[in-house]
Image: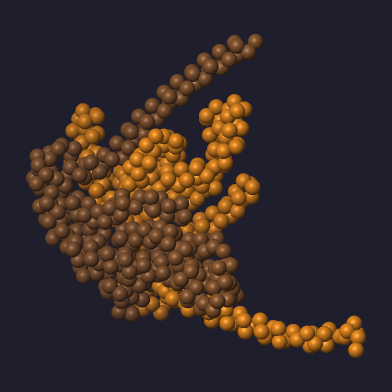
Chain colours: A brown, B orange
Amino acid sequence: MSTPHLALDLAALSRREARRGRAAHWKTVCGLLLALLWLLPFSFVVLAICKSTEEYATSAPLALPASLAPLLDNARDAWQQGEMGQAMLNSALYASVGTGLSVLLAAMAAFALTRIRFPRRNLWFLLLFAGTVFPFQMYLVPLFFGFQWAALLNTHAGMCLLYTALCIPFPVLVLRNYMQSLSLEVDQAARMDGASELTLFLRIILPCLRGPMAAVFLLQFTWIWNDMLFSSVLGNRPETRSIMNALLVFQGSYAQSGPNIMLTAAVLASLPTLLLFLLLRRQFMQGLRIA
Amino acid sequence: MNALMETDEQLLARIGLARIQAAEQARTGRQLRLALPFLAPALLLVATLLLLPVAYNIWLSLTHWQLFQGQDEFAGLHNYSQLWTSPYFDDALGNTAIWVAASVILPLLLGLVLAMLFRRMPGQEWFKSVIFLPRILAPTAVGVMWYYVYAPDGLLNQLLSTVSGQALQIGWLFEDSLITPAIILTFVWQTCGLVMVLLLLGLAALPRDPLEAARIDGAGPWQVFRHITLPLLSPTLLMVVILSVLAGFTVFDLLWVMGSSYPQQRTLSLAVFMYFEAFQKSNWAFAAATAVVIGGVVLAVTWLQTLLQARIDRMVR
């Protein structure tokens, strides 16, 4: 009795296996096509930055360049005409100071919110968290006049302060959630041994936060590097422009330089974050999971 | 004296309630003093640079402030009533509505398809990275790239010409009917990867048992997806929808870069309209009122999210 059943099952199983195999092939082909479609604009850009301005004007967008030689000229022209050197330095300053300071201050605030039992902690937390719920549009006009009043408009200090403030609330949220999962017993032991709150924070809690802090750091660094809006309102001078704002200004005045130069400038401006992503892809994804 | 015959006051005095209360107060005061040095820097920065400006912005929206006019003239809701009669505002609002609808539906559908496609596929890490890659770039850089993709002699026209067999030179970013869809396409290209990654994270966290049970009961792949996977995924879906609504509603950078040579720039979205009024026309009070409208909608959406989240949490549990 059991033999026919067995045979039937085996046939069905192998049919299903085959169907699954075909489906897998079909899926891989679809995925490959989609990936190629997604890469199409990139390939256009990669080809374009290898062409001279005349070559760009006369050849088809996806035609291969005659040689790679114009790439260096394009890079030099974009760097000089777009005033990208200063802007790169500015953005590096804003992103490192803004992110470093905000993550540190956020860790301190999260420490106080989770490890010290003072009254109305939730209210204090909500006050900090309120910094994430408003759209940027509500900050622009008041900050512009506030910065003018405080002589912070178009200064490096002003931009660093602003980026620090903007980047505090989100790490507070993430680090607070993380710290709540750390056991309180260590604290008590440390306090019994006479450790001050500062020692406790620096020696015991901070080392535990390396993972989430790195993840948050990456996300915030990329955000500051990629920001154009605040720089165009509060720091729109050649000395204080962020890199993306410089790119925008360059685009607005590109009459004298060709599309190949503009595209090269866009690639140069994106290289740092692109490299960061390619090198630290896993940490980026980790950051998204935490967020 | 018998303890049972004490009055309440006597009892409290004997066990020293006042002393306990005082000690308790001293303790919380001490704790607050311990906490403040850690809390104060963050709080100070957030309060002065973020919260104070929001309050100031609301006040500004109630004044007549513009170039060469004092900010001390109280205007009531004048700026808000002006908004509804401004023809640019109507167009900006309409475009923003299109943005919200498109940026919820398209990335979600496409992201869901991609997530289901790449799930358990060999080499999925590679595919995921490719789709996610545009998200790492600044919207400004993406805008510059796609500006030339959409140029009359750019990539898109070239591809369409090859497919259709006739030479096309469409100015995608110069025509009223084309510019918003064109920029939305760029937006989808850029943001789809994030939606996909979030959905994949949600899918990975799903419990196995209901799926197995449904499959054993003979449900087909579509039925499993429709009746088991989607409902279980609803918390993630809600988060993605809310993120997309907010992103679509406040979109600025892409529009500002790609629409820079479009004559009706300030109709492109509410955020662009606001920027235009503030920093090109110096209508500061009017711009502040626009910002309050944007902020009001954003807060309402966020509030809705917490409501729905609570409801879904209860349902799933």
Relative to B122, say whether B1 is above or below: below
Farthest residue toward the front? A193
Image coordinates of residue B238 in percent, x first then y, are: 52, 48
* Residue at (48, 58) in percent of width and height: B297
Relative to A284, say whether B50 is above or below: below
* Residue at (35, 72) in percent of width and height: A161
Total label count? 0
Relative to A119, say whether B164 is above or below: above
Image coordinates of residue A26 in percent, x first then y, are: 39, 27
* Residue at (21, 32) in percent of width and height: B161
Look at the image and tell me whether residue A216 can be seen.
no
Find residue A33 and report its image quarter: top left
Most foreground residue, B299 or A129: A129
Most foreground residue, B142 or B202: B202
Look at the image and tell me whether residue B182 can be seen.
yes
Left or right: A242 as drawn, with respect to B112 = left
Most foreground residue, A168 or B262: A168
From the image, which quarter does the N terminus of chain A lie in? top right
Relative to B272, say whether B218 is above or below: above
Image coordinates of residue B182 in percent, x first then y, are: 31, 44
Left or right: B226 as drawn, with respect to A139 = right
Image coordinates of residue B190 in percent, x first then y, are: 34, 47
